[in-house]
Amino acid sequence: MVISLHHQTNQLKGHIMKTKTVNGKKYKVTENGTYYYYNTPDSVINVIENEVHRYRRLKFIFGDTKTGIPWNEEHDNSGTIGKTTGNVKMVILLTNYNSMGGGIILTDCILQIRHVNNGGILYQHPKYKKSVVDIVPSDLPDYQYNTMVNGSLYGRHHSLRSAQICRSKLI
């Protein structure tokens, strides 16, 4: 593993950051040793650093930060924040605070972070374009409802309840 330290530092509300390159990849590193993708906005890092170990459930909307268009992910977008172990400690999304592992959070692709319980928005990308998710009658006889995202077919459902669950995961 090759690590080089750059002397550029940024001050985030109580979080001092340095830039490091590990195996040819550039990262922002906080004073507590958490690594973030280099293109991660400082405001995202500040929110995540303040939420680590608080065990509050958060919902992440991921997408294209150049256009602000979300990827409309149904899965692996809500949970509590933890960290990986090892030399390069990155933030991971845990199903709950008792979980032993989870997926790396794509911190450079976050369009919105909000609390699951009260819906309070902690971060929103300036270009974020919220998707419109509609439930409409199905066009096929074997299904009762379709979910439409921004006017395009997203899924077909046998029941209204199924369509509503899908919609709640997307918005």
Image (spheres, helix red, strand yellow):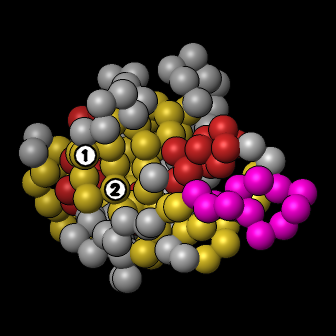
Residue bearing mark 1: 121
Q: Amino acid at mark 2?
A: Gln
- Dot 1 falls on a residue whose secondary structure is strand
**Left or right: 153 in relation to 73:** right
**Left or right: 22 in relation to 135:** left
Outermost residue toward the right in this view? 142
Q: Amino acid at mark 1?
A: Ile
Outermost residue toward the top in this view? 98
- N-terminal-most mark, 1 or 2: 2
- Dot 2 falls on a residue whose secondary structure is strand
Please count the marks in the image. 2
- State the residue in front, 124 or 81: 124
Give the label on residue 59, or none. Answer: none
Q: From the top left corner, tell me how far across and down residue 93 is, in percent.
A: 52, 39
Is there CB contact under 8 Å for labels 1 and 2? Answer: yes
Q: From the top left corner, tell me how far across and down residue 101 is, in percent.
A: 63, 32
User: Compared with residue 68, is residue 125 higher up or lower down, i.e. above or below?
Assistant: above
The residue shown at (34%, 49%) is 113
The residue shown at (55%, 33%) is 94
The part of the chain drawn in magenta is 135-147
- Does any portion of residue 80 appear in the rendered image? yes
Quote the CA–CA distance across marks 1 and 2: 7 Å
Residue bearing mark 2: 112
- State the residue in front, 140 or 108: 140
- State the residue in front, 164 or 169: 164
The residue shown at (84%, 67%) is 140
Magenta stretch holds residue 112: no
Q: From the top left corner, tell me how far across and down residue 13 is, in percent.
A: 9, 45
Q: From the top left corner, tell me how far across and down residue 79 is, in percent.
A: 50, 34
- Does any portion of residue 27 appear in the rendered image? no
Residue 53 quadrant: top left
Label 1, residues with CA under 10 Å away: few <14, some 14-19, many ≥20: few
